Amino acid sequence: MLAQTRGGIATRTFRTAVTSVFAAATVIGGTAIATADAPAPAPQELQSSLDRFVDPAVPAAAKTKLIVGGERRVANIEKMNQGLANYGKVGFNVSDVRAKGDTADARVAVVSPHGTMPGVPMSWQHTAAGWQLSDGTACVILAMGKAPC
């Protein structure tokens, strides 16, 4: 522990150094990460990201922001959007959300014109952009949309 010196200079220097270390650690591999545990997301928040991801009216460029590292998936998203254009409504029911650190996992029922697929495990990562679909989860959905990663 640092002792406070004349005018609090040592304490301020320590705080600045710690702040700088955390600021420098917020970007790893091109993806911004949260520096502290994020509050657990509500099921509705996660469901909203899924609904937007499968909405064929949402352009691929906007959907990339819903996925961690989403810029790698533009071609897959465009292909999925084409397939969903005349497919019918796809929906989700998110339950059993469990958050640990910057990761949230949930069970998701996928509802399509052909029926419901219950209990699909999906995950999200909390980044500077908020709760984003993990790349693995995005690839599961893209595969369902005949646009596998």
Image: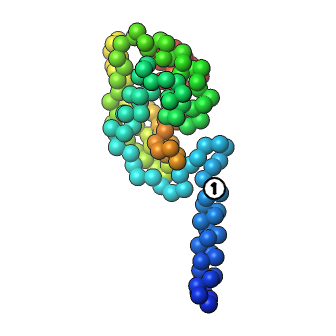
Q: Quadrant of the N terminus?
A: bottom right
Q: Give the quadrant of residue 44.
A: top left
Q: Quadrant of the C terminus?
A: top right
State the image coordinates of residue 86 (x, y, percent, origin top left).
40, 9
Kindly identify which residue carries mark 1. 25
Q: Name the residue located 47 percent from the left edge and 44 percent from the top edge.
A: 130
Q: Name the residue located 67 percent from the left edge and 43 percent from the top edge.
A: 29
Residue 84, relative to residue 94: is it above or below? above
> Which residue is nearer to you in this view: 136 or 26?
26
Q: Name the residue located 62 percent from the left edge and 83 percent from the top edge.
A: 9
Confirm whether residue 25 shows in the render. Answer: yes
Residue 15, relative to residue 36: is it above or below? below
State the image coordinates of residue 131 (x, y, percent, origin top left).
46, 42
Q: Name the residue located 50 percent from the left edge and 49 percent from the top edge.
A: 102
Q: Residues within 10 Å of mark 1 (few under 14, many from 20)?
A: few
Q: Give the quadrant of residue 20.
A: bottom right
Confirm whether residue 136 shows in the render. Answer: no
State the image coordinates of residue 145 (x, y, percent, origin top left).
48, 16
Amino acid beneath label 1: Ala
